[in-house]
Amino acid sequence: MTLQAGEGGTSIIRQRGSALYLLAGRLWAEARVSEGHGLCCLLPTLTPYPLSFSTQWNNWQNLQQAALPAVGRIALALDDDAHEEAVLLLLRHVLDVDSGYWLELERAVPNGLRKEVLAKLSELEERTSSTSSLGGHLKMLASHAGSSDPRERLFVAKHYRSTTKHLSNDNHLTFMKNIQPALQAWLKEGDGAVFETAVGIAEMLGYKLFERSAYAEAEPWLSAARDAGIASAELLRARWECRLYRGDERAAAEDWRAAEPIDDPAQGLSLGFFYRGDRQDRKAMGLARVARSLGKVAGGEDPCRDRPKTKKAKATSETERSSLLARARVLAEEAVTLVDERARGDEARARAGQGVTDRGFEVRIFAARALVREGSGDAAGALDDYRRARALATAAGLSWQGDLHGEDIRRLERAGKETGGAIPESFDPDWFLASERSDDERSRAAAVWCAQPWRVVPDARERGTSIPIAFALVKAIIDHSAALWKLGDEDGVKLPDRLELAQRARPLLDRFADRRDADRLEHVLDDAHEIAFDALPRHEKAERAPFFAFLQALGDSEAIDEERVLSALSDGAWSRVRRRLEAKLDELDPLRDVFDATVHAGAPMEAVAAALAAYQQLFRNDWASFATPRPAWVKLARPLERADGAKLAPALIELIRREQSVPGHYGLARLPAKSLWPLFYAWHPSTEAFLLEVLAGKLDNGKSLSAIQRKTRHECLSWFAGEKELATLGAALAKRRR
């Protein structure tokens, strides 16, 4: 291409035609050479998802659409003298665009080339098809990644790009290891469609590793994208953090300075999720992230959760630990200094009823300094920072965050206080199952917990303190406070200071926050304020008035405790909460039901603990395709054999019937085989009659089984019939087989 640049004459740009975006980037760089950027190529990105929280992904789609006519014309121009390059150009864009744009691309491409591209596409799809896992599929593709045919390499690169784009819960480091050899080889090509795709993969992989706090692995990929011409301010800021983490402050400062002239500060910066800010906020976020990561390393943790833990890992020496914490403190203090005054202003705005959701990132900055302070032995300073972070989270009003950092606050407040081996106030399976727990302690705990009326819904609100209803109600109000106070303002209601009310409610909330009974009650009374009151925007103003009167009563009270919360409820509100709880009792705590059943059956504490451990695993794992238990689970359940099966088996059967009567996400469910496993160890001959009911499908809520489900059911019941020598069940199974 010949470029006419004003009165400065012309310049020639030579680039392979299959790398259209890089060609455009080189053209743009040459046209702006007078700006002194010093780059041979200028592109903002080569991926539709440069950041996992990017809000500008539609810009890439717009670019794809705008480029389509040019793709067709350039392919035609290349076809006579560089046919393979024309095919590569088309393949690059066919593989890059979303399926919905293929029809538009068809119209832009001549028939002859279109047929060749489609035929090659089908051939490559067939040669590289795989039904294996992600790792297996990547290894299969690796055998094609070094092909002498650039079209084949491009096709593999397309798969790698697509997988990188959607990489979320998989181990990012393992994924990088799988594609690294091919990606490095493609980047060495230096030009063309394969190279251009590889640059986009490197950019995206670098960002994703960076977000995973894998700084050492992220930096080379970010640098590769930068060297190829990706002139993105956020790429430079990501590399700035990577370089800060490894202690290269001079190189980090260069990246920060280089990023400034690229973006438009008037547009603001995305700081993740709902958050927006300016360069000062972005710098504070980066400093805090690096400080937090250094603090984790000093504490013996790896900031990247994907990095495997090995026994050979070198322990951090005291000298290294002190050095890491010193660096972390400097960064954390600078981060807080940058946002402290702004955070105070945001709290003031929240008190005035203004929305500050986009400033929620400030929470992370104070929490990062708290972690560093705690690691340095400054528990009081850490507690102050965690409290500040929690107050800012309340101000931001993101309901899904819940009691952010409340657990850290309570942990630090409890530090140094002797519990004296006290029994928890309510059912606590982790305490009960702790290896150091004696049978005597377990017996005393069982006596206390089983005397609690946790399944009895009080008939009057004055007796509502027997279960933590007030906690569930107040927590829902605090979690949704920003939206609720906004609604009150629209209704012209003067409400108490939102942040002050939340602070006054903390003693009540903190008392119950770590208790299982409160957590389970909050689960079944999800958004309890909506159950008790008509507090939604769709309701009429007059219908919402009782709810706002309730809030005013809480604001006027001297203390926000259970008695005050319950007494402020109207009779109608209490009745609605009571009815909902009565309807949800069987969902309240199935594990607690198991505990009560085994204790009331007179099982020894060893068997009670076995039941809890075994059922915990049953509730946590799907295991829908397992007909019989695995050895690890059998080891947990075997102590059930020491219980009196005549008492325990009927109780467990009753639990199974109750569980089958509770609708799940898709309604009433078929009985899974795993529900029967505990009966094998808490055995009693009378259980055979129940197993015959299961065989007849009477526990499946009228639903038929699939072929796989029938096979699993049959294998499970055959296991019972064979091991327990059940003649009647065996005959019934044999009859079914015939």
Image (cartoon, rainbow, N blue to C red):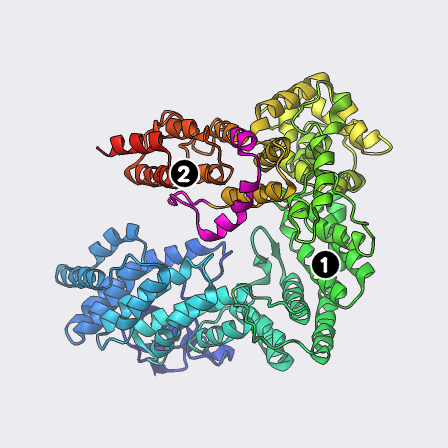
* Vertical relation: 334 (above or below) 445: below
Report helix, strand or loop for mark 1.
helix
Residue 594 in the figure: left or right of residue 175 = right
* Vertical relation: 210 (above or below) 251: above
Where, quadrant-wise, is the C terminus in this rendering?
A: top left
Query: Label 1 amino acid?
Result: Phe
Q: Residues within 10 Å of mark 2 (few under 14, many from 20)?
A: some
- For the residues labelled 2 and 1, the Cα–Cα distance comes to 61 Å
Q: Residues within 10 Å of mark 1 (few under 14, many from 20)?
A: many
Query: Label 2 amino acid?
Result: Lys
Image x and y of residue 708, in percent: 30, 41
Q: Which residues are magenta?
A: 622-650
Q: Residue furthest right?
A: 558
Image x and y of residue 139, in percent: 32, 68
Image x and y of residue 238, in percent: 55, 69
Most foreground residue, 374 or 685: 685
Disc marking residue 724: 2
Q: Main secondary structure of the magenta part?
A: helix
Disc marking residue 366: 1
Disc marking residue 293: none
Most foreground residue, 137 or 495: 137
Most foreground residue, 477 or 383: 383
Most foreground residue, 236 or 521: 521
Image x and y of residue 449, in percent: 71, 35
* Vertical relation: 297 (above or below) 56: below
Whether tag 2 and tag 1 are in contact, CB under 8 A, the answer is no
The quadrant holding residue 8 is bottom left
